[in-house]
Amino acid sequence: QVQLVESGGGLVQPGGSLRLSCVASGMFIFRIYDMGWYRQAPGKQRELVARISSGGITDYVNSVKGRFTISRDNAKNTVYLQMNSLEPEDTAVYYCNADARTYYPREKDYWGQGTQVTVSS
């Protein structure tokens, strides 16, 4: 019964910062999961924002490079997304994803319910 719970979203002004957290439960070995943050803005498709592999390799969509940082704390079963210099275009529902298919190809990936980030003055 893997569950992902996101938190940390809210309303911020342009230029502000937020830190999103995703806490996983029900995972036998959290550290083997590749973790990612996705977002979906109104009228747009879901996009990958940032990901961090089980080995700690990170990747970001070009629009957030230099502003967002993804990290993980395996001892806390948690992945974070530090978002700085937020722009109105960052407004979206942000979803946490966990994927163990690198190690278990037959496994499914998992999603949280999302947390709303609104950047507006």
Image (spheres, helix red, strand yellow):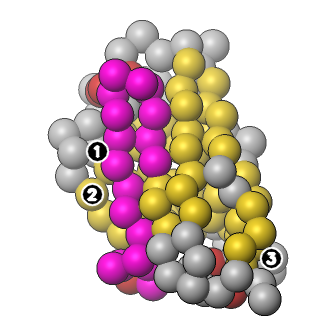
The Cα atoms of the two marked residues, 2 and 1, are separated by 7 Å
**Callout 3: 10 Å neighbours few (<14), some, many (20+)?**
few
Q: Which residue is mark 1?
A: 53
Q: Amino acid at mark 3?
A: Pro
When asked about the image quadrant of residue 100, the answer is top left
Between disc 2 and disc 1, whose residue precedes?
1
Taking depth in this image into account, of 60 and 77 the one nearest to the observer is 77
Q: Are marks 2 and 1 in contact (CB under 8 Å)?
A: yes
When asked about the image quadrant of residue 76, the answer is top left
Residue 67 coordinates in the image, percent (x, y): 41, 77
Taking depth in this image into account, of 83 and 98 the one nearest to the observer is 83
Left of 102 or right of it: where is 23?
Answer: right
Viewer can see residue 46: yes
| Tag 2 secondary structure | strand
106 relative to 51, above or below: above
Q: Quadrant of the N terminus?
A: top right
Residue 40 coordinates in the image, percent (x, y): 69, 67
Q: Amino acid at mark 1?
A: Ser
Q: Which residue is mark 2?
A: 58
Give the magenta-colored segment's residue range.
63-80
Residue 69 coordinates in the image, percent (x, y): 37, 63
Residue 113 coordinates in the image, percent (x, y): 74, 42
111 relative to 120, above or below: above
Between disc 3 and disc 2, whose residue precedes?
3
Q: Is residue 91 one of those drawn in magenta?
A: no
Q: Which residue is mark 3?
A: 42
